[in-house]
Image (spheres, rainbow, N blue to C red):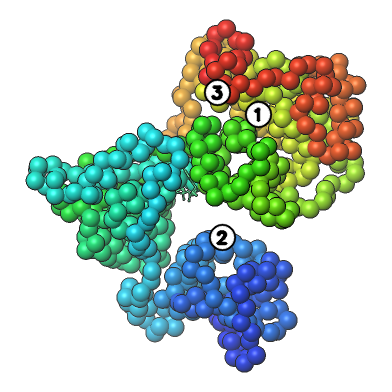
Amino acid sequence: MLVGLGLSAWLIVGGIGAQRSASQTISFSQVLKKVDARQVQAVTVDPNGKLTGSLRDGTSFTSQVPTALGQNDLYRRFEAGGARIDATGPGSSWGTVLVSLLPVAAIFGLFLWWGRKAGSQVGALGAIGRSKVKVVDTERPTVRFEDVAGYEGVKREVGEIIGFLRKPDRYRRAGAVGPHGVLMVGPPGTGKTLLARAIAGEASVPFLSVTGSAFVEMFVGVGAARVRDLFTEARKLAPSIIFIDEIDAIGQRRGGAVVANDEREQTLNQLLAEMDGFDAAEGVVVLAATNRPDILDPTLLRPGRFDRQVVVPLPNQGERKAILAVHCRDKRLASDVDLDAVARSTPGFSGADLANLANEAAINAVRAGRVRLTRDDFRDARDRILLGLREGSNVLLPEEKVAVAVHEAGHALVAALSEHADPVEKITILPAGQSLGATEQLPLAERHLLSDSWMRTFLAVRMGGRAAELVVFGEGSTGAANDLSEATQMATRMVREFGLSPALGPVGYAPTGPMYLGRDQISMRQYSEETQRMVDAEVSRLLREAEASAVEMLTVRRRELDSLSGRLVAEETVDGVSVYELVGRPVPVRHLDGEHNETKDPRHSAA
Ligand code: ADP
Ligand code: ZN
C-alpha cells in the first residue's frame, strides 16, 4: 500500500513538471549528466521513449531515450543518482523492463495500484496482453564468422546449422531431421550473442532475439502468449533463427523453488510445446544462451529440444589476442603496442571485456590528443577495467597509505623471493574500486595444471600482505580479509580435492557445488565428522605454515621490505623489475607460448 502511494506521488510530481510550459529539450547524454550530478528528481518515460523529467530546482525538461541503451544499466544509473523513474502506461517496454527490476513488494504494490486504476484487474491484464510491447528484435545481421575471433571448434560445431538454414529442403527430401535447438553455455560476454548473429549472417536469414527475463512478466499469461507470437513470426520469416538469451530465466528447474512461479511454468510449457511442434523442414532453428546450465529444467534438454550443447568458455591467451586484433582492426596502434603482451596480461577477460579494453584504450588516446594507441593506453585501460574506475586522487589517510604500502610490499617480496611464484608485474597503492592496493602477478603462461609447490607458494604469497603487517606493525588488519579467504579456499581444495595432505592421504572429495533449496540436496558432506575435523586441522596447518614462511622471509628481508614500502608511499606504483633488482634475483623470463617455462617441478610437464 505504501508503495502504491509512493508511486502515485511520483506521478503527481511528473505531472506537475510536465505541465510547466517552459520545459527545455536536452540531449540524453545531458540527462545522464544531470542524473549523475543528482540534480534530477523524477522522470517519466512514455512508450515511445519520450522522457519528461523534473529537476530538484523545480524546472523541468524533456528528452528522447535512445533505443539502443542497456535498460538495466540505465535503471541502476538513475537509481544511483537518486532519480525516480516512472513509465507512463503499460505499453512501454521501458516500463515493463524497469518495473520488473523492482523488488517483489514494489511490484505487488504496483499491481494493486494498476488494478484499481483500470477498474478491474482483468482490464489491466487485457491491455497489457494486447499492447505492442516490443520484446522481440528482428534483424538481418551482417556479422560473419570472421568477426568472431577464435572459437574454431565452436564454429565447426554450429557449422551444420548454417547448411541447414541455407537449404532446409535438402533435409526434407532426405527425410532427415535438421538441427532444432542448440544451447550455448558460457560466462557472460564470451560472444554467445555474437556467434548466434554470425550464424544468421553466414546463412543470411532473419534473426529474432529475445531475452528470457523479458518473457517472465508479472502478469500471468503474457509470457506464454509472447512465446507463441515469437514462433509464429519466426515461421513466417523462415528459414530463420530464434535466439533466446538468458534462457535460465524461463527454463529453471521446476518444483524445487520455494515459491512456485506459475508464470514461468506457463512460459516454459509454451516454449516446450512450440519446439515439439516443429516440422523438420520448417527451417527455424532455436539458439539459446545461458551461464547456468545446472539450473535448467531437464525437459528442455530432451531430444528434439535443446539436444545440442556447445560450450563457449572464456577465451585463452591466443584467443584473447585474436579478439583484440578484431577490435583493433579499425584503430591505429603505436609501434610499442604488443597485442601478445596485452593478451597475456588479461587472463580471465571475456570477449566483451577485451572489446571494452580496446575502446577504452582508444578513448585514452583521444583524451591525450593522439590518434595512435600506445602501450600505456592499453595498460591504463586494462587497469581501469580490472580494478574499477580510479577515483581521482588517493583518498587514503597518510597512515593508511603506509599500511597499504607495507601490505602490498609484503605480497610482492614473497612472490619475488619464491621460485614457484608467478612473476611480479606491478605493485600499486592507488585505491581502485574495492581494493586499496594491488600486487599484480602475471603467469608465465596459461596454466592448466597447478603443482603442489605452486599452490604452497600461492598460499605464502597471499599471506605475504598480512605477514608484512605482522612484521612491521606487530598486528594484522582488516586489509587481509580477501587474501585470507582466497588462501583458505585454495588450502581447502588442496586437502579435500587434490589429495595433498599427508594426514588424509590421497583422497579427493567432489567439490561442493552451489546449494539449492531443491528436493535432492539434503546432505552435502560425503565424509564423517572425524574426517571433517581432520580437514579443518590440515587446512589450518597449511595456512599457518604459509604464514610462518612468509613472516620468516620478510623478517630476513626486513631492509628490503622497508625500502620497497617506502618507495611505494612515495611513488604509489612500482614496476616488477625493480622488485627483482631490489632482492637481487633475475627477472623471470617469459616465453611466448609457454612451451619452455616450467615450474622446475619434475612431476609436471609444461602446461
Ligand atoms: P554473450 O552473449 O556471451 O554475453 P556477447 O556476444 O554479447 O556475449 O559479446 C559482447 C561483445 O564482446 C561482442 O559484441 C563483441 O564486441 C565482443 N566479443 C565477445 N567475444 C568475441 C569474439 N570471440 N570475437 C570478437 N569479439 C567478441
Ligand atoms: Zn593483500
* Horizontal relation, residue 157 to residue 164: left or right: right
Identify the residue under disc 1.
442
Labelled disc at residue 520: none
The one of 508 and 87 positioned closer to us in this rendering: 87
User: Is 78 on the left or on the right of 475, as rendered?
Assistant: left
**Residue 443's image quarter?**
top right
| Marks 2/1: CA–CA distance | 32 Å
- Whether residue 592 is visible to the viewer of this picture, yes or no, is yes
| Residue at 89% over, 38% down | 570
Question: As shown in the figure, which amino acid type bears the numbered disc 3?
Answer: Asp
Q: Which amino acid does label 1 sit on?
A: Leu
From this view, report whether residue 374 is shown above or below residue 94. above
Nearer the observer, 411 or 428: 428
Q: Where is residue 189 in the image (x, y as percent from the top left)?
A: 49, 46
Q: How many marks?
A: 3
Mark 1 closeness class: few <14, some 14–19, many ≥20 residues within 10 Å: some
Tell me the crowding category of disc 2: few under 14, some 14 to 19, or many 20 or more residues within 10 angstroms, Cα based. Answer: few
Q: Which of marks 3 and 1 is nearer the N terminus?
A: 1
Residue 550 horizontal side relative to residue 229, left or right = right
Q: Mark 2 points at which residue?
A: 73
**Going by the picture, which residue comes out furthest to the top?**
602
**Residue 333, image x, y percentages:** 63, 44
Identity of the residue drawn at 31% across and 64% down:
226
Mark 2 or 1: the one toward you: 1
